[in-house]
Protein backbone atom coordinates (compact mmCIF):
# COMPACT_ATOMS: atom_id res chain seq x y z
CA UNK A 1 0.00 0.00 0.00
CA UNK A 2 2.88 2.34 0.92
CA UNK A 3 4.59 1.72 -2.42
CA UNK A 4 1.28 2.38 -4.27
CA UNK A 5 0.94 5.73 -2.50
CA UNK A 6 4.55 6.53 -3.39
CA UNK A 7 3.93 5.62 -7.03
CA UNK A 8 0.84 7.90 -7.18
CA UNK A 9 2.84 10.74 -5.62
CA UNK A 10 5.50 10.27 -8.29
CA UNK A 11 2.97 10.88 -11.13
CA UNK A 12 3.26 14.37 -12.50
CA UNK A 13 0.49 16.61 -11.01
CA UNK A 14 -0.92 17.47 -14.47
CA UNK A 15 -1.17 13.80 -15.44
CA UNK A 16 -2.78 13.10 -12.04
CA UNK A 17 -5.39 15.81 -12.77
CA UNK A 18 -6.09 14.30 -16.21
CA UNK A 19 -6.60 10.86 -14.64
CA UNK A 20 -9.11 12.31 -12.16
CA UNK A 21 -11.07 14.00 -14.99
CA UNK A 22 -10.99 10.79 -17.04
CA UNK A 23 -12.32 8.75 -14.09
CA UNK A 24 -15.11 11.26 -13.45
CA UNK A 25 -16.18 11.29 -17.11
CA UNK A 26 -16.18 7.47 -17.22
CA UNK A 27 -18.39 7.32 -14.11
CA UNK A 28 -20.71 9.91 -15.65
CA UNK A 29 -20.98 8.06 -18.99
CA UNK A 30 -21.87 4.80 -17.21
CA UNK A 31 -24.71 6.27 -15.17
CA UNK A 32 -28.29 6.29 -16.50
CA UNK A 33 -30.14 9.45 -17.37
CA UNK A 34 -32.75 10.92 -15.05
CA UNK A 35 -36.30 9.80 -16.05
CA UNK A 36 -37.28 13.38 -17.02
CA UNK A 37 -34.28 13.45 -19.37
CA UNK A 38 -35.27 10.13 -20.96
CA UNK A 39 -38.81 11.36 -21.58
CA UNK A 40 -38.82 14.97 -22.73
CA UNK A 41 -41.23 16.63 -25.10
CA UNK A 42 -39.32 18.11 -28.02
CA UNK A 43 -40.70 21.21 -29.75
CA UNK A 44 -42.95 20.57 -32.74
CA UNK A 45 -40.99 20.69 -36.01
CA UNK A 46 -43.44 23.39 -37.27
CA UNK A 47 -45.85 25.94 -35.83
CA UNK A 48 -49.13 24.72 -34.34
CA UNK A 49 -51.08 26.36 -37.18
CA UNK A 50 -48.72 25.21 -39.95
CA UNK A 51 -50.77 22.13 -40.82
CA UNK A 52 -54.00 24.06 -41.42
CA UNK A 53 -56.46 23.55 -42.98
CA UNK A 54 -55.87 19.77 -42.82
CA UNK A 55 -55.21 19.77 -39.05
CA UNK A 56 -56.31 22.88 -37.16
CA UNK A 57 -54.22 24.82 -34.66
CA UNK A 58 -56.90 23.97 -32.08
CA UNK A 59 -56.38 20.24 -32.63
CA UNK A 60 -52.60 20.66 -32.46
CA UNK A 61 -52.83 22.70 -29.25
CA UNK A 62 -54.83 19.91 -27.62
CA UNK A 63 -53.04 16.99 -29.22
CA UNK A 64 -49.45 18.19 -28.71
CA UNK A 65 -49.96 20.52 -25.77
CA UNK A 66 -52.26 18.32 -23.66
CA UNK A 67 -52.37 14.68 -24.82
CA UNK A 68 -48.73 14.23 -25.87
CA UNK A 69 -47.44 16.37 -22.99
CA UNK A 70 -49.35 14.21 -20.50
CA UNK A 71 -47.95 10.95 -21.94
CA UNK A 72 -44.39 12.28 -21.67
CA UNK A 73 -44.85 13.50 -18.09
CA UNK A 74 -46.51 10.27 -16.95
CA UNK A 75 -43.87 8.11 -18.67
CA UNK A 76 -41.13 9.93 -16.73
CA UNK A 77 -43.04 9.51 -13.45
CA UNK A 78 -43.63 5.79 -14.00
CA UNK A 79 -40.03 5.22 -15.11
CA UNK A 80 -38.85 6.80 -11.84
CA UNK A 81 -41.00 4.32 -9.88
CA UNK A 82 -40.15 1.28 -12.01
CA UNK A 83 -36.58 0.52 -10.95
CA UNK A 84 -35.67 0.17 -14.64
CA UNK A 85 -32.60 1.80 -16.19
CA UNK A 86 -32.54 3.09 -19.71
CA UNK A 87 -31.28 6.07 -21.64
CA UNK A 88 -33.88 6.33 -24.40
CA UNK A 89 -37.64 5.86 -24.82
CA UNK A 90 -36.86 3.11 -27.35
CA UNK A 91 -34.93 1.13 -24.71
CA UNK A 92 -37.74 1.50 -22.18
CA UNK A 93 -40.36 0.44 -24.73
CA UNK A 94 -38.39 -2.69 -25.64
CA UNK A 95 -37.76 -3.51 -21.95
CA UNK A 96 -41.43 -3.24 -20.99
CA UNK A 97 -43.22 -4.63 -24.07
CA UNK A 98 -45.32 -7.68 -23.24
CA UNK A 99 -44.53 -7.48 -19.49
CA UNK A 100 -47.72 -7.30 -17.44
CA UNK A 101 -45.83 -5.79 -14.49
CA UNK A 102 -44.76 -2.81 -16.64
CA UNK A 103 -47.93 -2.42 -18.75
CA UNK A 104 -48.67 1.11 -17.50
CA UNK A 105 -45.14 2.31 -18.18
CA UNK A 106 -45.17 0.66 -21.62
CA UNK A 107 -48.44 2.41 -22.51
CA UNK A 108 -47.18 5.88 -21.54
CA UNK A 109 -43.71 5.36 -23.02
CA UNK A 110 -45.09 4.04 -26.31
CA UNK A 111 -47.59 6.90 -26.55
CA UNK A 112 -44.80 9.42 -25.88
CA UNK A 113 -42.65 7.87 -28.63
CA UNK A 114 -45.50 7.31 -31.13
CA UNK A 115 -46.56 10.95 -30.92
CA UNK A 116 -43.07 12.38 -31.41
CA UNK A 117 -42.68 10.05 -34.39
CA UNK A 118 -46.08 11.12 -35.75
CA UNK A 119 -45.17 14.84 -35.66
CA UNK A 120 -42.08 14.06 -37.72
CA UNK A 121 -44.17 12.15 -40.26
CA UNK A 122 -46.10 15.34 -41.12
CA UNK A 123 -45.08 18.59 -42.76
CA UNK A 124 -46.81 21.62 -44.26
CA UNK A 125 -47.31 21.17 -48.02
CA UNK A 126 -46.49 17.49 -47.70
CA UNK A 127 -48.20 14.59 -49.42
CA UNK A 128 -47.65 13.95 -53.08
CA UNK A 129 -45.65 10.92 -54.20
CA UNK A 130 -42.36 9.83 -52.65
CA UNK A 131 -39.38 9.31 -54.90
CA UNK A 132 -36.22 7.24 -55.04
CA UNK A 133 -35.72 4.11 -53.01
CA UNK A 134 -38.88 4.56 -50.93
CA UNK A 135 -41.10 4.62 -54.02
CA UNK A 136 -39.30 1.56 -55.41
CA UNK A 137 -39.86 -0.35 -52.16
CA UNK A 138 -43.53 0.72 -52.00
CA UNK A 139 -44.09 -0.38 -55.60
CA UNK A 140 -42.38 -3.73 -55.08
CA UNK A 141 -44.31 -4.36 -51.83
CA UNK A 142 -47.79 -3.06 -52.73
CA UNK A 143 -47.87 -3.00 -56.56
CA UNK A 144 -48.14 0.79 -56.86
CA UNK A 145 -48.20 3.92 -54.70
CA UNK A 146 -51.95 4.21 -55.30
CA UNK A 147 -52.45 0.61 -54.16
CA UNK A 148 -50.41 1.37 -51.02
CA UNK A 149 -52.56 4.42 -50.20
CA UNK A 150 -55.74 2.41 -50.77
CA UNK A 151 -54.57 -0.36 -48.42
CA UNK A 152 -53.35 2.15 -45.81
CA UNK A 153 -56.71 3.97 -45.83
CA UNK A 154 -58.67 0.71 -45.63
CA UNK A 155 -56.58 -0.52 -42.70
CA UNK A 156 -56.90 2.86 -40.94
CA UNK A 157 -60.67 2.64 -41.30
CA UNK A 158 -60.57 -0.88 -39.86
CA UNK A 159 -58.84 0.01 -36.58
CA UNK A 160 -61.51 -0.63 -33.95
CA UNK A 161 -61.40 2.07 -31.30
CA UNK A 162 -58.08 3.84 -30.71
CA UNK A 163 -54.82 2.97 -32.39
CA UNK A 164 -52.10 3.63 -34.94
CA UNK A 165 -51.38 2.73 -38.56
CA UNK A 166 -47.70 2.20 -39.40
CA UNK A 167 -45.82 1.75 -42.66
CA UNK A 168 -43.06 -0.60 -41.55
CA UNK A 169 -39.95 -2.16 -43.00
CA UNK A 170 -39.16 -5.79 -42.37
CA UNK A 171 -35.97 -6.55 -44.28
CA UNK A 172 -36.53 -5.64 -47.94
CA UNK A 173 -40.30 -5.72 -47.66
CA UNK A 174 -42.62 -2.92 -46.55
CA UNK A 175 -46.02 -3.60 -45.01
CA UNK A 176 -48.78 -1.91 -43.03
CA UNK A 177 -49.17 -2.65 -39.34
CA UNK A 178 -52.17 -1.53 -37.34
CA UNK A 179 -51.94 -1.42 -33.56
CA UNK A 180 -54.43 -0.88 -30.76
CA UNK A 181 -54.21 1.79 -28.09
CA UNK A 182 -50.52 2.53 -27.33
CA UNK A 183 -48.98 -0.46 -29.10
CA UNK A 184 -46.11 0.47 -31.39
CA UNK A 185 -44.13 -1.06 -34.26
CA UNK A 186 -41.00 -0.88 -32.06
CA UNK A 187 -42.49 -3.57 -29.84
CA UNK A 188 -42.80 -5.88 -32.88
CA UNK A 189 -39.14 -5.65 -33.97
CA UNK A 190 -40.13 -3.76 -37.11
CA UNK A 191 -38.61 -0.56 -38.45
CA UNK A 192 -41.34 2.10 -38.56
CA UNK A 193 -41.09 4.48 -41.53
CA UNK A 194 -44.36 6.40 -41.18
CA UNK A 195 -47.32 6.48 -38.81
CA UNK A 196 -50.79 7.94 -38.56
CA UNK A 197 -52.58 8.47 -35.25
CA UNK A 198 -56.19 7.28 -35.53
CA UNK A 199 -57.22 7.97 -31.95
CA UNK A 200 -60.33 10.17 -32.00
CA UNK A 201 -58.39 13.00 -30.33
CA UNK A 202 -56.32 13.25 -33.54
CA UNK A 203 -59.26 14.19 -35.76
CA UNK A 204 -62.56 14.67 -33.92
CA UNK A 205 -62.36 18.48 -33.59
CA UNK A 206 -61.76 18.87 -37.33
CA UNK A 207 -63.49 15.85 -38.90
CA UNK A 208 -65.92 14.59 -36.23
CA UNK A 209 -66.72 10.96 -37.14
CA UNK A 210 -65.20 11.08 -40.64
CA UNK A 211 -61.94 9.28 -39.93
CA UNK A 212 -61.56 8.35 -43.61
CA UNK A 213 -61.49 12.02 -44.67
CA UNK A 214 -58.80 12.73 -42.06
CA UNK A 215 -56.68 9.78 -43.24
CA UNK A 216 -56.89 10.69 -46.93
CA UNK A 217 -56.25 14.39 -46.27
CA UNK A 218 -53.12 13.61 -44.26
CA UNK A 219 -51.80 11.15 -46.86
CA UNK A 220 -52.41 13.57 -49.73
CA UNK A 221 -51.44 16.88 -48.12
CA UNK A 222 -49.26 16.40 -45.05
CA UNK A 223 -47.32 13.12 -45.28
CA UNK A 224 -43.59 13.73 -44.98
CA UNK A 225 -42.26 11.07 -47.35
CA UNK A 226 -38.71 12.49 -47.10
CA UNK A 227 -38.74 11.66 -43.39
CA UNK A 228 -40.09 8.15 -44.11
CA UNK A 229 -37.38 7.63 -46.76
CA UNK A 230 -34.68 8.77 -44.33
CA UNK A 231 -35.59 5.85 -42.04
CA UNK A 232 -35.06 3.09 -44.62
CA UNK A 233 -32.31 0.69 -43.54
FE1 LIG B 1 -52.67 11.11 -30.36
Image: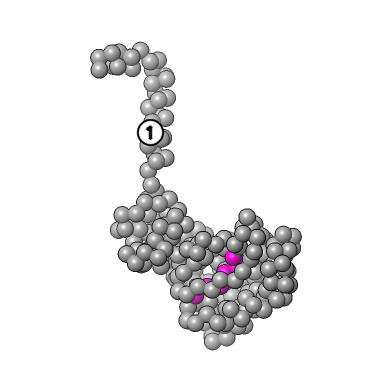
Percent from the top left, x then y, of residue 102?
35, 63
Q: Nearer the viewer, residue 86 or 206?
A: 86
Q: Quadrant of residue 151?
A: bottom right
Above or below 75: residue 209 = below
Percent from the top left, x then y, of residue 149?
67, 75
Query: Residue at horizontal 35%, vertical 12%?
Result: 10
Query: Residue at horizontal 57%, vertical 76%?
Result: 56
Quadrant in which the C terminus is drawn: bottom right
Percent from the top left, x then y, of residue 111?
45, 67
Above or below 105: residue 56 = below
Secondary element type, mark 1: helix
Q: Is residue 182 left or right of residue 219?
A: left
Quadrant in which the N terminus is drawn: top left
Q: Which residue is mark 1?
A: 24
Residue 85 on the magenta span: no
Q: Is residue 68 at all visible to an observer of this figure?
A: no
Q: Is residue 148 left or right of residue 199?
A: right
Tell me the magenta residue range: 163-168
Above or below 198: residue 16 = above
Q: Is residue 76 at all visible to an observer of this figure?
A: yes
Percent from the top left, x then y, of residue 91?
44, 55
Amino acid sequence: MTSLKQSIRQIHPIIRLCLVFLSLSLISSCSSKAPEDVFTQKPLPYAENALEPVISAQTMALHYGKHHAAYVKKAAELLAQSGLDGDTPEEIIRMTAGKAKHQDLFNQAAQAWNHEFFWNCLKPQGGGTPGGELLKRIESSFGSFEAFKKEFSAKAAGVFGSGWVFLVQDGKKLSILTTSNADTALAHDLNPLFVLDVWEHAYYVDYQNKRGDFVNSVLNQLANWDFAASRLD
